[in-house]
Image (spheres, rainbow, N blue to C red):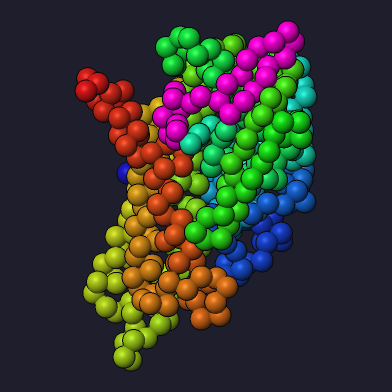
């Protein structure tokens, strides 16, 4: 089937591209892979906000535009294509805003939603713990109610953006005496609150976007609770679909995806273009086809969301396929570049601006962050195929 966008959607895509051409250097060798995680700019966020492109799918009553998820996907696709520095507003737009609209108090909506839409604040995600990675129900960081406050003690790890964000979205244990799925609650907390210690974690690539966050008798008002106490697990379920379903799970390495083809066509080995080697042509063709398949799977998720349905199964398929593609892309690029492909961006000899090496080192995390591939396969088995739990 040959899909087409509407005239209005094509015009919207052109508007985005014109904006990005002005704001970002067109030469893609100047951008970085995983820019949606690693590259932050308050100035850029506010320019995006001025265009009305943050919170664009939110209801108009909350400052949004009520636009479709297809429109938002077109926007995020182009942002990733250009390697735009979107990390500062990405989580608030994708996840925190919709969570507050669904479960937040009117005070929380009034406090946070306008500031997210204006690109003024950013959020870190505090979910994983040292003994509870993707098994969120095993978390132990405890929030104990006392008068009008909660006292928090424990640790989060691989917390994205906590060194730079103003607020942290936390999933905490509020009742250790009930079945583990029933004693979890959600909070939004100012990271300047006493009792919070943020420590950056340096990855193999040298990046420091991830952190570990320690809570020591951290006292927060009960107004920080999002939704109902002990009902956080059920609130989180829909949020994880937003987190898993985006095209960032396919296009995090887009600059590498485009330029490895260019590199193969322009690089010669023993007087012969790399792109003329049968195995190279096969690998590049395979990646090109898989990219288009992954893109359609993600547009399918947006289509389901636009119909007002929960894309639980569709999001699991899209994320599992997308992260596998990212790992294959990184591996293939490293093979095509040869030994030089192992050089990082700080080396003047590194081909493709060091993207091959950087993406290769990132790739083990692709199938973990946002939910492991094993968990996604369980979602597909039980909810998609109706198979019994083993």
Taking the view exactly as shown, the residue that stands out farthest to the front is: 216
Q: Nearer the viewer, residue 102 or 163?
A: 163
Which residue is at the front of the view, 225 or 13? 225
Quarter location, residue 26:
bottom right
Q: Going 30% across and 30% down the picture, which residue do you hit?
A: 378
Residue range of the region highlighted in magenta in the rendering: 131-154
Give x and y (percent) for residue 95: 58, 32
Q: Residue furthest bottom?
A: 271
Question: In the image, residue 230 lies at what x, y percent?
Answer: 54, 12
Q: Position of residue 168 (x, y in %)?
A: 66, 33
* 187 sits left or right of 130 in the view: right
Q: Residue at x 33, y 28 (%)?
A: 379
On whether residue 302 falls in the magenta region, the answer is no
Residue, x 45% and y 67% (percent of image)? 357
Relative to 279, is 77 above or below? Answer: above
Residue 36 visible: no
For residue 153: magenta? Answer: yes
Left or right of residue 106, residue 16 in this image: left
Q: Quadrant of residue 346?
A: bottom right
> Could you tell whether 270 is left or right of 164 in the image?
left
């Amino acid at each position: 089937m040959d899909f087409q966008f509407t005239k209005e959607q094509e015009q919207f895509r052109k508007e985005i591209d014109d904006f990005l051409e002005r704001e970002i250097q067109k030469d893609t060798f100047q951008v970085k892979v995983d820019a949606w995680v690693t590259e932050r700019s308050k100035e850029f966020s506010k320019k995006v906000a001025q265009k009305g492109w943050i919170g664009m799918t939110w209801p108009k009553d909350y400052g949004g535009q009520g636009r479709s998820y297809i429109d938002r996907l077109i926007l995020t696709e182009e942002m990733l294509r250009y390697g735009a520095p979107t990390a500062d507003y990405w989580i608030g737009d994708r996840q925190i805003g919709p969570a507050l609209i669904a479960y937040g108090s009117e005070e929380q909506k009034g406090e946070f939603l306008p500031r997210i839409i204006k690109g003024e604040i950013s959020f870190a995600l505090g979910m994983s713990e040292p003994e509870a990675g993707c098994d969120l129900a095993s978390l132990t960081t405890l929030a104990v109610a006392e008068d009008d406050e909660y006292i928090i003690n424990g640790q989060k790890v691989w917390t994205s953006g906590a060194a730079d964000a103003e607020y942290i979205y936390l999933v905490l244990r509020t009742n250790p005496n009930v079945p583990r799925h029933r004693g979890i609650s959600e909070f939004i907390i100012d990271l300047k609150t006493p009792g919070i210690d943020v420590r950056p974690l340096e990855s193999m690539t040298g990046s420091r976007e991830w952190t570990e966050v320690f809570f020591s008798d951290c006292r927060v008002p009960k107004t920080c609770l999002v939704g109902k106490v002990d009902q956080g697990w059920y609130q989180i379920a829909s949020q994880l679909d937003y987190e898993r379903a985006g095209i960032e799970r396919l296009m995090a390495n887009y600059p590498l995806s485009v330029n490895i083809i260019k590199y193969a066509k322009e690089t010669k080995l023993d007087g012969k273009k790399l792109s003329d080697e049968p195995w190279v042509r096969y690998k590049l063709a395979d990646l090109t086809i898989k990219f288009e398949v992954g893109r359609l799977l993600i547009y399918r998720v947006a289509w389901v969301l636009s119909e007002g349905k929960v894309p639980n199964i569709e999001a699991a398929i899209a994320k599992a396929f997308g992260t596998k593609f990212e790992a294959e892309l990184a591996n293939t690029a490293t093979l095509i570049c040869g030994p030089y492909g192992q050089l990082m961006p700080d080396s003047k000899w590194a081909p493709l601006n060091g993207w091959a090496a950087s993406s290769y080192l990132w790739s083990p995390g692709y199938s973990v962050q946002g939910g492991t591939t094993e968990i996604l396969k369980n979602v597909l088995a039980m909810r998609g195929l109706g198979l019994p739990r083993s």
